[in-house]
Amino acid sequence: MTRSKAIARKVLFFCRPSIPVHFNEPVHYAVKFRSAIPRYLIGCLPAWFARPFMTVRVSERIVEIPFVFSNLRVPKGSVVVDVGCVESRLSLELANLGYKVLAVDIRPYEFCHPNLKVIRGDFVQSPIDDRSVDAVVAVSTLEHLGLPCYSMQGSPGSDLSAMEKIRRILRPGGQLILTVPYGQEGQTEWFRVYGHGALQRLLEGFAVDKLEFYERIGLDAWKEIREENARGISSDGETNCVALVSAFVAKRQNG
């Protein structure tokens, strides 16, 4: 991505229409054009007029969210932290299912539930006590942490700092459910892509219980693939492959 395009995307991101935060649905309409300016202008049009310029897209949430509900193994009433809750219904859904949810994001979360507590701010600096949490869910979040396009304070190692925080706040034997872009390792203005080695570094201190990989097929489908096939997939500009992880903190952990 050229410097001028990167600057344009940042400007358009912060100058987008001031509307309430929306849910990032797994199946949604998206502008057909890849260029930032047409995408922004069409996004400002009334829905009926913009429809000819839109196409149906299926994001990685179509496999990530079912993975969470299929693999979350802590009992109802457990304390679950959702890292990066905005634009997702996951915190609300978990709260409605009976989990005690701590939803963390740098942006305001406009919804509430008796089982839901919102913590606004940097996750790494959040006031969550060590060994106080039964499970942590981080769906398509770590790859964004510390990147300047989100006006975040951070560094290239912000994702590793977040993982260190997760290890600290989880009780011994606590569960982590993590999803990240996977394939040819790299970084765009908006997200990181994790290769085999980078993913292993994220998961240091965890015993992996389940690891799955899914590849985007066209605009409207995802399919499970083997890791050796996932490693060669490029996600330059948008996520084309994801790793879905369920892991547990070793019960013998002391630090």
Image (tube, helix red, strand yellow):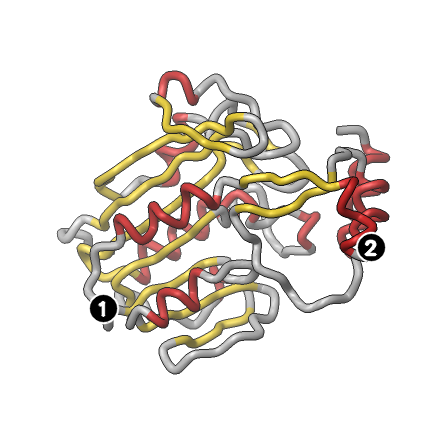
Between discs 1 and 2, the one toward the N terminus: 2
Left or right: residue 122 versus residue 167 is: right
Left or right: residue 89 versus residue 130 is: right
Which mark's residue is nearer the viewer, 1 or 2?
A: 2
Left or right: residue 213 versus residue 247 is: right
Left or right: residue 108 versus residue 127 is: right
Q: Secondary structure at mark 2?
A: loop
Q: Residues within 10 Å of mark 1 (few under 14, many from 20)?
A: few
Q: Which residue is mark 2?
A: 44
Identify the amino acid type marked 1. Answer: Lys
The spot of residue 113 in percent (x, y) is 43, 79
Whether residue 7 is visible, yes or no, is: no
Identify the amino acid type marked 2. Answer: Cys
- Quadrant where the C terminus sits is bottom left
Whether residue 83 is visible, yes or no, is: yes
Q: CA distance from mark 1 to mark 2?
A: 42 Å
- Quadrant where the N terminus sits is top right
Q: Which residue is mark 1?
A: 76
The label on residue 94 is: none
Residue furthest to the left in view is: 252
The spot of residue 4 in percent (x, y) is 86, 35
